[in-house]
Amino acid sequence: MSKQPVRIASLGDLDDCRVPLVTEPLSASQADRLAPSFKALGDPVRLRLLSLIASHAGGEVCVCDLTDAFDLTAPTISHHLKVLKETGLVTAERRGTWVYYRIRPEALALLSTVLAVPQEAPA
Amino acid sequence: MSKQPVRIASLGDLDDCRVPLVTEPLSASQADRLAPSFKALGDPVRLRLLSLIASHAGGEVCVCDLTDAFDLTAPTISHHLKVLKETGLVTAERRGTWVYYRIRPEALALLSTVLAVPQEAPA
DNA sequence: CGTCTAGTTTGACTGATGTCTATTCAGTGG
DNA sequence: CCACTGAATAGACATCAGTCAAACTAGACG
């Protein structure tokens, strides 16, 4: 439906970062705000967590299901989820005993756009 | 499937990573090969370096020009360029006294694809 | 209230990372 | 051959990041 003006406090304003990095040089400020998101993706465990969350039917996953998918302790998974949450890539919601995570598609899409290579890219 | 000889993963084949992370869960192997690229993008200096290289007219930039754009020493810039090179995001070519860097558009495009959010993505 | 389960937080440890200075390598040109 | 410049490497150092065990918090349910 209509998009809510969701705003992640801990996630800096990335509104001015919607232009491919190939198109024009990133400012230092833009780079400072984008880097944490890419850094969050720079760990294999977090990449898989994000993918598991993003690709799951229903759009959300319980932490317990995520923990089972790795050979890591629950605190470690929790730590990685926190990193993803703090960079605005996912959101968390508690329902009863369980906590469910879902992705923030806009965040993912923005990063995808930054890396996109327009057709008429400089050769 | 015939097992291929083990490849150095710093720039390992990412041929089987062309599917959006949202579409299906990444395997551990895929995540292991993708993570270094995102990690390389996880530093503000490298993001700006990449953007400077990618957006430069002519498609290439001399290291001397890059060094001037930052308040960092030449070895530090060199180190960051090495990281970008080792992850396959850029290539380097020496011509005379100078070394020119250019991006590898395929590498960038692949990462963009991995992060892409197809329209019918789970909300 | 007591207890059980799901998740998170804390603290510690270890290994990786960003930066610098000093040194070395690669070409150019006297 | 030697000196000079652009760039990369080596080593050192401080900080950060991933992991775990232990302790803690949030609900559910007798």
Image (cartoon, coloured by chain):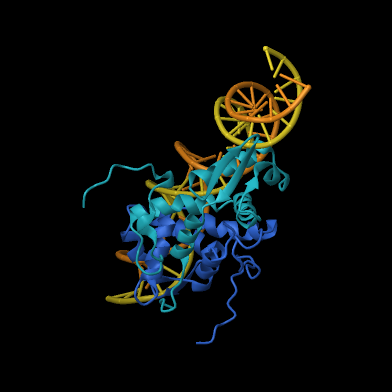
Chain colours: A blue, B cyan, C orange, D yellow
Q: Is residue A113 left or right of residue A75?
A: right
Picture coordinates of residue B91, whole percent (x, y): 53, 46
Q: Is residue B33 visible?
A: yes
Among the 4 quarters of the image, the one containing residue A5: bottom right
Q: Nearer the viewer, residue A92 or B56?
A: B56
Among the 4 quarters of the image, the one containing residue A64: bottom left
Above or below, comparing residue D1 to residue B37 in the picture: above
Among the 4 quarters of the image, the one containing residue A6: bottom right
Q: Residue at x 51, y 53 (%)?
A: B104
Q: Nearer the viewer, residue A87 or C9?
A: A87
Q: Nearer the viewer, residue B20 or A2?
A: B20
Picture coordinates of residue A94, whole percent (x, y): 44, 73
Q: Nearer the viewer, residue D18 or B122?
A: B122
| Quadrant in which the C terminus of chain B is drawn | bottom left
Q: Is residue A82 visible?
A: no
Q: Residue at x 24, y 47 (%)?
A: B3
Above or below, comparing residue B76 to residue B53 in the picture: above
Q: Is residue A24 left or right of residue B17?
A: right
Farthest residue toward the left? Answer: B1
Above or below, comparing residue D5 to residue B51 in the picture: above
- How many callouts does the rendering have? 0
Picture coordinates of residue B103, whole percent (x, y): 55, 52
Q: Is residue A103 left or right of residue B50?
A: left
Picture coordinates of residue A65, whole percent (x, y): 33, 65
